[in-house]
């Protein structure tokens, strides 16, 4: 159960700590006093998305701490989720939001992602509010509600069905990996054969494209190369060219080197330049003499490069990638050609699994029909107890003419929708289309009373929407009974509900200095009488007596 909630710098709350009790805890106060801040803080600590606007004006961060006392089952669940050891049966959730938008979430002091905080919180607390009401109105959620209600009967069959369903899906994937049906296999064989033949016919050689590109570049620039080489040879061989000038320079050096040994060293070092330049001139001349432009060869190279470009566009960015793709095609083709036996084996297994799945799904549907009758009876009984004596409720099952593979889902083949009528003589219609706010509140409370919660704390927001008078008494009685087995926290405007609370908190807004401040106070007996008098709208001693009478009535329920 939720032992305490500590709130710091959240909206109008500067600092507050609430110590909750067992049973029913009521939070009351004038409209706008700040009850929504308490619920917002609870949603925040449960990992819901938070806006920076929740931080109290002028502060750098907001923080909420929640302390829970838990049993061994919850301890095990928290440890499985987080790996965090839970000591002394206490789980402490902490969440801080800073003005820069950064979050810090902790479980028993250990930093965790917000998603983990949310998972842990949902082990511990269940909040019924507008979101859950909207969820109940969606037909797609009705089947899980029915399954939860009839868990003992339905869960074993559903678990077995899901085993069969998952195995069938795995066989489907296996069949697809083998090529699917016969037509698909034939198509895949033709495709692989075509791709292999196209690549093989090209007779690609690794590095061929680079060599061809070099050839094309040279042929494209034949004239430039011819002119450049001719000019270079002319510079070297001219009367005043490079070779002649180097020879003359060496001759002059030879005539004076006898006067200095260093000049002799220089001469011996430079002498190879003369021969090198001669070799350089000869090499250029030889290259030029052998140059020729073959137009037919140019056309062949260009065409070959285009062929390779087409293959690259289809099968890879390089010849190496294209050849690797071909090898993969060969492997896939071999697998397909050798997979006929495996294909038939998989098809046979799928057919057998489909029969088992269908058998299991039919048993599941039959169990749901049986559970639905019980749910119908009990929901009607609950609603009659809540002042709807002429209501009718039915779990509607969609008719299925023929069960096909396409109709199977992860939870069977049933499609259901809750049907409801609030008044005698009115036909049953989809719950979402005809239920009012007050009726929805009673319906949800009746449902909660029937479906055992797997969390220690339930929080109700706006459970009293559209309800008052004697119906408020009925609702209060139901809440009191629910709180005998679970901790219940309720935000309410009804004095009837507040009167049956074992712990009553007043949310009040006031001013402290130049700031508006929301405070939370646990009421004593006199405080409760005063608050109930306000909620009842009474004045003077008569109102106080009415509040005392209501508290006396509430105590008679225990």
Image (spheres, helix red, strand yellow):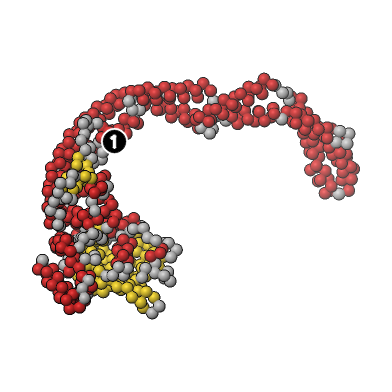
Q: Position of residue 431 (x, y in %)?
A: 23, 48
Q: Which residue sits at x=53%, y=30%?
A: 312
**383 with respect to 18 (left or right):** left
Residue 216 visible somewhere in the drawing: yes
Front in this rendered view, residue 267 or 468:
468
Q: Which residue sits at x=33%, y=59%?
A: 47
**333 with respect to 321 (left or right):** left
Displayed quadrant of residue 285 = top right
- Examine the rendered structure and indicate whether residue 32 appears above or below residue 165: below
Residue found at the far top of this picture: 296
Displayed quadrant of residue 85 = bottom left
**42 with respect to 361 (left or right):** right
Q: Which residue sits at x=56%, y=29%?
A: 309
How many numbered circles are shown?
Answer: 1
Front in this rendered view, residue 66 or 146:
146
Quadrant assignment for the N terminus = bottom left
Front in this rendered view, residue 248 or 479:
479
Q: Position of residue 78 (x, y in %)?
A: 26, 57
Displayed quadrant of residue 240 = top right
How many other residues sit within 10 Å of disc 1, few (<14), some (14-19) or many (≥20)?
Answer: few
Q: Position of residue 385 (x, y in %)?
A: 12, 56
- Tag 1, which secondary structure? helix
Q: Position of residue 462 (x, y in %)?
A: 25, 60
- Examine the rendered structure and indicate whether residue 544 appears above or below residue 409: below
Q: Which residue sits at x=25%, y=69%?
A: 28
Quadrant assignment for the C terminus = bottom left
- Examine the rendered structure and indicate whether residue 328 appears above or below residue 463: above
Front in this rendered view, residue 541 or 521:
541
Residue 81 visible somewhere in the drawing: no
Identify the residue under disc 1: 170
């Amino acid at each position: 159960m939720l032992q305490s909630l500590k709130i710091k710098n959240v909206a109008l709350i500067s600092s507050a700590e609430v110590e909750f009790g067992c049973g029913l805890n009521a939070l009351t106060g004038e409209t706008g006093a700040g009850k929504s801040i308490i619920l917002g803080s609870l949603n925040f600590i449960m990992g819901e998305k938070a806006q920076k606007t929740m931080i109290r004006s002028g502060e750098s961060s907001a923080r909420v701490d929640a302390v829970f006392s838990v049993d061994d089952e919850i301890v095990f669940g928290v440890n499985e989720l987080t790996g965090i050891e839970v000591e002394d049966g206490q789980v402490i959730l902490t969440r801080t939001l800073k003005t820069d938008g950064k979050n810090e979430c902790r479980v028993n002091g250990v930093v965790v992602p917000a998603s983990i905080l949310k998972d842990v919180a949902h082990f511990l607390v269940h909040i019924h509010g507008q979101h859950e009401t909207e969820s109940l109105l969606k037909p797609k959620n009705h089947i899980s509600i029915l399954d939860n209600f009839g868990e003992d009967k339905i869960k074993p069959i559903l678990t077995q069905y899901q085993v069969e369903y998952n195995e069938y899906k795995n066989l489907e994937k296996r069949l697809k990996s083998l090529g699917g049906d016969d037509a698909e296999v034939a198509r895949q064989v033709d495709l692989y054969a075509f791709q292999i033949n196209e690549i093989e016919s090209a007779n690609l050689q690794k590095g061929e494209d680079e060599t061809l590109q070099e050839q094309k570049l040279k042929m494209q620039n034949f004239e430039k190369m011819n002119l450049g080489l001719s000019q270079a040879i002319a510079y070297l061989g001219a009367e005043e060219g490079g070779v002649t000038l180097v020879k003359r320079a060496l001759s002059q050096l030879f005539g004076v080197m006898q006067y200095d040994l260093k000049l002799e060293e220089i001469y011996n070092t430079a002498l190879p330049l003369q021969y090198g330049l001669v070799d350089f001139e000869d090499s250029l001349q030889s290259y030029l003499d052998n140059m020729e432009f073959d137009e037919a060869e140019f056309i062949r190279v260009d065409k070959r490069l285009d062929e390779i470009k087409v293959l690259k566009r289809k099968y890879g960015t390089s010849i190496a990638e294209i050849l690797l793709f071909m090898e993969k095609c060969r492997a896939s083709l071999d697998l397909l050609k050798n997979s006929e036996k495996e294909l038939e084996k998989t098809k046979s297994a799928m057919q057998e699994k489909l029969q088992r799945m269908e058998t299991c799904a039919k048993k599941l549907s039959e169990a749901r029909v049986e559970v639905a009758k019980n749910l119908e009876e009990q929901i009607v009984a609950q609603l009659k107890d809540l002042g709807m004596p002429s209501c009718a409720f039915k779990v509607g099952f969609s008719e299925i003419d023929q069960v096909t593979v396409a109709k199977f889902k992860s939870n069977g083949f049933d499609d259901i929708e809750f049907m409801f009528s609030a008044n005698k003589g009115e036909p049953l219609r989809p719950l979402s289309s005809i239920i009012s706010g007050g009726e929805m509140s009673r319906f949800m409370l009746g449902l909660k009373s029937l479906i055992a919660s797997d969390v220690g704390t339930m929080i109700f927001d706006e459970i009293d929407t559209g309800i008052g008078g004697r119906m408020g008494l009925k609702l209060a009685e139901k809440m009191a009974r629910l709180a005998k087995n679970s901790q219940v926290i309720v935000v309410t405007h009804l004095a009837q509900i507040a009167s049956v609370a074992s712990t009553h908190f007043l949310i009040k807004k006031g001013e402290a200095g130049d700031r508006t401040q929301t405070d939370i106070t646990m009421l004593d007996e006199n405080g409760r009488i005063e608050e109930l008098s306000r909620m009842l709208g009474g004045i003077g001693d008569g109102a106080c007596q009415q509040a005392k009478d209501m508290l006396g009535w509430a105590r008679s329920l225990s």
